[in-house]
Image (cartoon, rainbow, N blue to C red):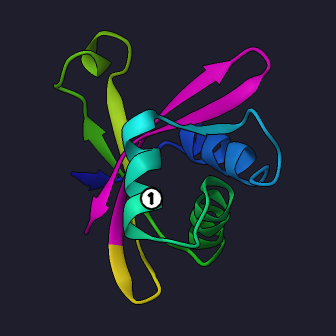
Amino acid sequence: MAPLRDSVIAKAFREALENWNRVGYVRLLRVPNEWLRDHLPGETAQSLVRMMYEHLLAGGEIDQVIETRDPWRNTHDFHYDFRFAIARRKIYVETVIDLGRMGPTVTIVSIHNG
């Protein structure tokens, strides 16, 4: 695990996450959505993405990890981890990013206690 140093990917994350209040830039898969509902009542997908964006604005790092797991390794060389606290609870948010022609999109593939 190493901090993200690729400026293109870092810029793409910022571009996607700064649209935290719009649909289509970040999506949660079913399992992380259920985890959020079950473990952080009162938080929503939108509030989570806003906090991820605020993490970046505050200088928080994103870790870049070589992807080795199916099915993600077939479509992504890396996944990217956010680690920050929500209500004094440390969480870990695992994402992948796609750099599409219409702009970057982030998929949250996992969330758990950090």
- Which residue, given by chain and number where applicable, does mark 1 sit on? 36
| 29 or 68, nearer to the observer | 29
Residue 17 position (above or below residue 67): below
Q: Quadrant of residue 16?
A: top right
- Crowding at mark 1 (Cα within 10 Å: few <14, some 14-19, many 20+): many
Q: Secondary structure at mark 1?
A: helix
Q: Which residues are magenta?
A: 91-114
Q: Position of residue 41 (x, y in %)?
A: 50, 71
Identify the residue shown where x is 65% and y is 71%.
Answer: 54
Pick the front one: 7 or 74: 74
At x 58% / y 73%, what residue is drawn?
42
x then y, percent, for residue 112: 29, 59
Q: Amino acid at mark 1?
A: Leu
Residue in front for this viewpoint, 53 or 3:
53
At which x and y percent is residue 103?
75, 26
Answer yes or no: is residue 62 visible. Answer: no
